[in-house]
Amino acid sequence: MTSQLEVENLQAGYDDLQVLKQVSFSLQPGEIGCMLGPSGCGKTTVLRAIAGFEPAWNGRILIDDIEVSSRKINIPPEQRNIGMVFQDFALFPHLRVEDNIRFGLRGMRKREQRSRIQEMLAMVGMLAYARAYPHQLSGGQQQRIALARALAPAPGILLLDEPFSNMDVDLREQLAREVRNILKQENNTAILVTHDQNEAFAMADQICVMNEGSILQQGSGYDLYHRPANRFVADFIGQGVIIPAMVESPTTVKTDLGLIRGKHNIDAETGTMVDVLIRPDDVVHDDESTESAIVVEKAFRGADFLYFLRLDSGIEVLCLAPSHHNHKINERIGIRLNVDHLVTYSRN
């Protein structure tokens, strides 16, 4: 049975070093969450605390409304009904695939074990490999077996600690989508830890962006990209530049790119200078436009070019254009704004 998870004001660390500072979030049964952030931000420590490997200094962790971690309580990992998929998969090299999956089913009768193993192998598309050894499998296949082994005992919550980090970039995103489909099929509550935003976008319902032991923002990938709560989230999620602007009205600012209007009120008075986040998809290449910029640099992305453009004022912006618009360095091209989400920050 899938479980509900609540983390309330969690503080934790190692020896005398505090890593987590008032971390709070929750997941409903069947929801997939993600702890996303740079190396050393504390995301793996969150996972270890939920699993029961690290005690809570303060705050508490509840699974299905039962307190499993606090200053006074630390229920052992084996009693928390939690499964884990590790970065290196941790498959037993001397055991065949079916025996790796059987490892977590030792309390079942043999007939039930065989049925569950077959069910898990079918779910991850690996029925033909039941008698293979881990070294005979590709990285992606090993990842599927590690997932099947973790899901076989039907844990209430599944924890995934950077499970795709040893794979090439293209395979990571593909596997993230596959794992999401499997977890949704099983209605599993799960948490992914990663530093790769594309993995997070492909897999998670809710993403917590972390830095220096704190959650800076929690939301969907769409919200984090279009409505980042602060400069760190804006910089960490996606690409973009921050340019100066003057507030013209509660929903309008004036920039070197022209007037930008948004749907929500700006938290600053008229006439105040603010900073505005401009994403590459906010700047549209348009040969008919009277506004233009110089191509300073470009990066081919297959379907698109990412252009680095310099305005006449000297300010640089990014522009994402279809790859059949192939312009040269130092060429002047027409641009126009297409900003839907106006994101402003007070100036430093």
Image: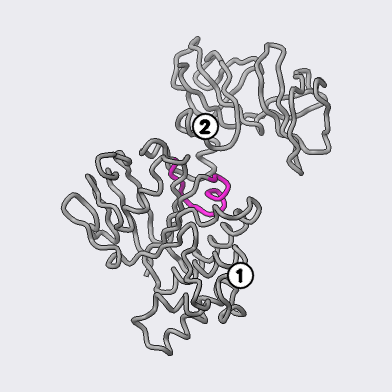
Against 60, is 103 above or below?
below
State which mark lies toward you, 1 or 2. Answer: 1
Against 268, is 131 above or below?
below
Q: Quadrant of residue 110?
A: bottom left
Q: Which residue is mark 2?
A: 234
Q: Residue at x 52, y 16 (%)?
A: 249
Q: Which mark is residue 175?
A: none
- Location of residue 316 in the rendering, given as x and y in whole percent from the top left corner: 66, 20
Nearer to us in this view, 270 or 58? 58
Q: Residue furthest left?
A: 72
Q: Which residue is mark 1?
A: 137
* Magenta-drawn segment: 196-209
Q: Quadrant of residue 292?
A: top right
Q: Residue at x 29, y 52 (%)?
A: 54
- Location of residue 267 in the rendering, given as x and y in whole percent from the top left corner: 44, 21
Disc 1 residue crowd, few under 14, some 14–19, many 20+, Cα 10 Å = some
- Location of residue 218 in the rendering, given as x and y in whole percent from the top left corner: 42, 42
Position of the N terminus by quadrant: bottom left
Residue type, label 2: Ala
Local secondary structure at mark 1: loop
- Left or right of 336 in this view: 332: right
Q: Residue at x 82, y 34 (%)?
A: 325
Local secondary structure at mark 2: helix
- Left or right of 332 in this view: 277: left
- Location of residue 36 in the rendering, given as x and y in whole percent from the top left corner: 47, 44
Against 153, is 287 above or below?
above
- Left or right of 258 in this view: 231: left
